[in-house]
Amino acid sequence: MNTTENIRAQFPILNKQINNNALVYFDNAATVQKPKQVIEAIENYYYNSNANIHRGVHTLSRVATELFEQSRKTIASFFNVKNSQQIIFTSGTTDGLNTLVQSLSKSVLQKNSEIILSTYEHHSNILPWQLWAQHNNGKLKIIPLKENHSLDLEKLEQLITPNTKIISIAHVSNTLGLITNIEKVKEIAKKYNLIIVLDGAQSAPHMKIDLENLDVDFFVCSAHKMYGPTGIGILYMSEKWLQELPVSKVGGGTIKTVSFEKTEYEQGALRFEPGTPNISGAIGFAEAIKFTNIVGITSIYKHELDLVNYAQKQLNELPEVIQYGVSKEKAGVISFNVKNQHPFDVGSLLDKYGIAVRTGHHCTQPLMKVLNTQGTIRASFAIYNTKQELNYFIEKLKKVITMLK
Amino acid sequence: MNIEEIEKEIIEEFELFGDNWEEKYEHIIDMGKNLPKIADENKTDKNIITGCQSRVWLNTELKNGKMIFTADSDAIITKGMVAIIVRVFNNQTPQDISNAQLNFINVIGLKEHLSPTRANGLLSMIRRMKQDAKNLMNGSNNNN
């Protein structure tokens, strides 16, 4: 039975007391807590199967290789990707985007190329492109927001010029929880033959993502926001790019033959995975996917959406609160401020009650500028959060508002 | 009063709250509201101390061999903490400020505010105050 109580029992850290209060963990968009299956899978790997992969003839190396490649398959199947080679292990979303920009700069991107991003990108989907643009006379074009803080995709088409090559966009805003209408983005991208890079860091933990049907060029996400360990993520690429994308990072494990004159590279995912990979991380990631499959990603979405709508409704009743990006369809995140109060003060006092929220700019400073605020308070939910926790949060938020008056 | 005497006074003040952190924080917030405000013309880029989450403005002057601080912050809890430090350091000599250990912050249970991860600019503010004190001491030595 997948009752919230049963699910909570699988997360040892949720029993912790913080400042003499039961922990209420609402910082899941930063990183989510891990179920004990994931912790045990990592431990078990080091106890029983640790060896380097893809090169040894000995038994342990074969076992470790098998576990690693099986993990790739589990993850591929979760995203409905038939060829698991299209799943490249990275150290996370940031690494995936950096690697990708480097590789694209060796093929598609030329001097004066233009890249389209959105106002609500987190810094990881801005800085690698910006760094490239600074050295190559490139340009970043930004999709603006509508009044309700969702993306104004009506304005997307007018940003496109003959130099536009790529649209790199957040599937879900980490600060607001709003979901990008990717079908609309695709429709325009296909019309102009643009490459789509989909940043799934905040969508993959909450929503069913079918990469086969989504049909984007690239997709990145991080395991640690999906009940998996830190330090591992994936870069998915379409079949076409798996064949054509140049490598940007090289080293052991990526090659067939090497001489000082010439190197012949591996085919498939290995071509993009130099050095000893994060083997235990991949195994932990796959275990997290198994956990998600048992609970069901659609149940996760529904549970979190219930919490979001409940929270939005409760906050709406507090006259001192300003909410950002309110919507009936969101992926597990609410963002707000208390009028005339600094988010730091509200967050510090909530922490005293054992409530973990994020305050500040959430690594989206350009978005903060558009919202005309220094920062916001963000509460983000996971499958183990409850309405009781939300009631406690609202009760304490009211107390905090009184204290700060 | 010297720095140690003021520290003792603050410790006694906070002892009244016992384990009641809510009252303690209400007191800090009140102190923040009563902090003698830095003059607007002194809210310059030179006087800003940037933490990741909240900002502090600090102006230092020397009058009759004693240091005078005025300050502000955009977050009220940070401002309250700033007020406590200013209360301890105001009208003290550069020498005493430079040597101060500020152990009382630990005693009154507010040490977490000095943790670098709080990113509230407070730690940087204390460093700046002590640096200003050292600079003044060195400056006066040079004049000799």
Image (cartoon, rainbow, N blue to C red):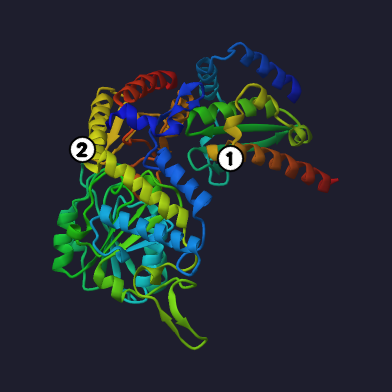
Q: Is residue A106 above or below residue A194?
A: below
| Tag 1: amino acid | Pro
User: x, y (%) of residue A230?
Assistant: 45, 49
Determine crowd level at label 2: few under 14, some 14-19, many 20+ residues with C-alpha closer than 10 A.
some
Residue B116: numbered disc:
1
Q: In the drawing, does residue A245 fall left or right of residue A38?
A: left
Q: Are marks 1 and 2 on the same chain?
A: no
Q: Nearer the viewer, residue B142 or A82?
A: A82
User: x, y (%) of residue A319?
Assistant: 28, 23
Quadrant containing the C terminus of chain A in the rendered view: top left
* Chain letter of the residue carrying label 1: B
In the image, what residue occupies the spot 51% across and 34% down?
Answer: B73
Q: In the drawing, does residue A3 fall left or right of residue B78?
A: left
Q: Nearer the viewer, residue A327 or B27?
A: A327
User: x, y (%) of residue A80?
Assistant: 23, 56
Q: Secondary structure at mark 2?
A: loop
Q: Which residue is mark 2?
A: A327
Q: Is residue A157 above or below residue A180?
A: below
| Tag 2: amino acid | Ser
Q: Nearer the viewer, residue A216 or A256?
A: A256
Q: Which residue is farthest top? A: B16
In the image, what residue occupies the spot 51% across and 24% down?
Answer: A19
